Amino acid sequence: MKNLDKGTIVRTVVLFVMWGNQFLVINGYSPLPLDSEMVEMGTTSFLTFCASLWAWWKNNNITRKARRNEELLKREGLK
């Protein structure tokens, strides 16, 4: 267990929690008391956040490598 990174442990714990949640749902229990409007609002908010973050990241030169490549393209007259 010493060689496992934190990400692996977190993903495994989340997986087991979700399996437990799915088991409860299959057996008729509602571990998360949400109505359909709350689910819809949460889903659309999450998707909007992800799309915004992705568009911001893709259209801006955030990383050092991206800025370096942008500078190279300008120097070579390719952009």
Image (cartoon, rainbow, N blue to C red):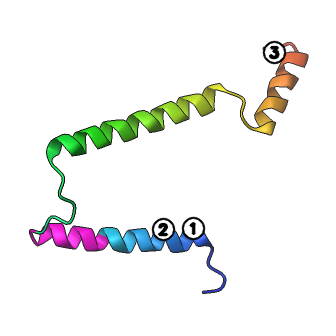
Rendered image: mark on residue 78:
3
Q: Secondary structure at mark 1?
A: helix
Q: Secondary structure at mark 3?
A: loop
Relative side of 14 to 74, left or right: left
* x and y, in percent, of residue 44 in the image: 32, 36
Is residue 51 shown above or below 2? above
Rendered image: mark on residue 22:
none
Q: Looking at the rendering, in which quadrant would you find the N terminus?
A: bottom right
Residue corresponding to mark 2: 11
Q: Secondary structure at mark 2?
A: helix
Q: Report the residue at 57% width, 67% height from top.
A: 7
- Pointers 2 and 3 in contact (CB under 8 A)? no
* x and y, in percent, of residue 74 in the image: 85, 17
- Pointers 2 and 1 in contact (CB under 8 A)? yes
Marks 2 and 1, Cα distance to the nearest angstrom? 6 Å
Label 1 or label 3, whichever lies nearer to me, is 1
Identified by mark 1, the residue type is Gly
The quarter of the picture where residue 32 lies is: bottom left
Q: Residues within 10 Å of mark 2 (few under 14, many from 20)?
A: few
Between 31 and 3, the one nearer to me in the picture: 31
Marks 1 and 3, Cα distance to the nearest angstrom? 40 Å
Q: Report the residue at 15% width, 64% height from top.
A: 30
Is residue 71 shown above or below 22? above
Q: Is residue 69 magenta?
A: no
Relative side of 65 to 14, left or right: right
The quarter of the picture where residue 43 lies is: top left
Residue corresponding to mark 1: 7
Q: Which residues are magenta?
A: 19-28
